[in-house]
Amino acid sequence: MLVKKESNEQKTTDVIQWKLKRVICSHKGWVSSICFDPSNQWFCTGSHDETIKIFGMIRGEQRLTLTGHIGAVKSLKVSPRHPYLFSAGDDKTIKCWDLESNKVVKHFHGHLSGIEVVDLHPTIDVIGEESPHLISSSADSTIKMWDIIAGKCMKTLTQHTKGVRCVEVWDKENMVSASFDSIKLWDKGEFVENLYKPNDIINTIKRNQDGTIISSSNNGVITVFNLNTITQTLHNIPQPGSLEGEKGILCSTFDQTGLRFFTGCVDKTIKMYAPQ
């Protein structure tokens, strides 16, 4: 089991405690994806308003809006090697954007339902092609691995029985995926084990360089943990005037330093958390 939750959670002096530091209001729909550029100078967000927005990191100012998806933009990934941005969403399509021209240069098709996650794998070992490759997960219960250059699906993982809401590549060999039914651990594209059964719909799982893991869910709870224990639980507070059902968190991620994490919420806000 990945997490052993003690009934009497204790804080230790060497465990970072996180606090809300900033709220950004820009999208007209739910904020469902966040990703940072490798230099940590800017970040981008995708929304149910069908747009992708790019913001400056220091002041949080909006710099650019990209349009092209038909439906919610569920996931974003910035390539560390080229000025490319990958986006995916409810239109069942992965788009590759050239950020120098701000235009789509390639499409990836193959999922039968909306795509929940797109990520870049740091190694070629899973597929064996000498090119970086994409990993995507979908409401069709599958995880697909793609050859970026050919634009073709190279492998489909089918061990989930429900829609796969999140996939997180942890290192060159391991990744974790989560759906309504389970959280699964993978090694080089092969299923290893079920980690644990979540109590609510988990939308994202992210880990920073220090091994701190955060998960966020539809009930507005952010759980901070390591491989052995839960260290903190945070509750999202919707903006004034929001409905009770708008406390859900659709995405979360650390910035490149691992010292801040951001969440995208049903109340259309982007929230930044940092150590107290």
Image (cartoon, rainbow, N blue to C red):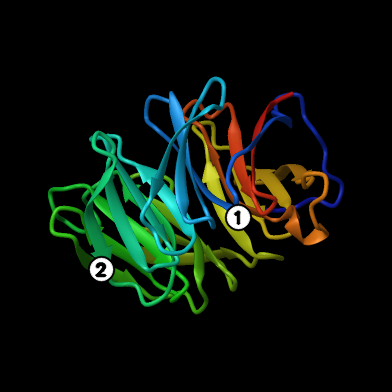
Residue 204, compared with residue 108, is above or below; it is: above
| Residue sitting nearer the eye, 155 or 273 | 273
Q: Residue at the location (56% across, 27% down)?
A: 60
Q: Is residue 241 visible?
A: yes
Residue 223, compared with residue 69, is above or below; it is: above
Amino acid type of the residue that numbered disc 1 sits on in the rendered structure: Leu
N-terminal label among 2 and 1:
1
Looking at the image, residue 221 sits to the left or right of residue 175; the answer is right
Q: Secondary structure at mark 1?
A: loop
Amino acid type of the residue that numbered disc 2 sits on in the rendered structure: Lys
Labelled pair 2, 1 in contact (Cβ < 8 Å): no
Q: Position of residue 87 (x, y in %)?
A: 37, 52
Looking at the image, residue 156 sits to the left or right of residue 54; the answer is left
Give the Cα distance between marks 2 and 1. Answer: 26 Å
Q: In the picture, which quadrant includes the C terminus?
A: top right
Q: Position of residue 175 (x, y in %)?
A: 42, 54
Q: Which residue is mark 2?
A: 155
Q: Which residue is mark 1?
A: 2
Q: Residue at the location (54% across, 57% down)?
A: 48
Indicate the quadrant where residue 101 lies.
top left
Q: Looking at the image, is mark 2 or mark 1 nearer the viewer?
A: 2
Indicate the quadrant where residue 18 lies.
top right
Q: Is residue 167 visible?
A: no
Q: Secondary structure at mark 2?
A: strand
Residue 159, compared with residue 126, is above or below; it is: below
Q: Position of residue 220 (x, y in %)?
A: 73, 53
Q: In the picture, which quadrant includes the N terminus?
A: bottom right
Q: Residue at the location (45% across, 66% down)?
A: 90
Looking at the image, residue 96 sits to the left or right of residue 214; the answer is left
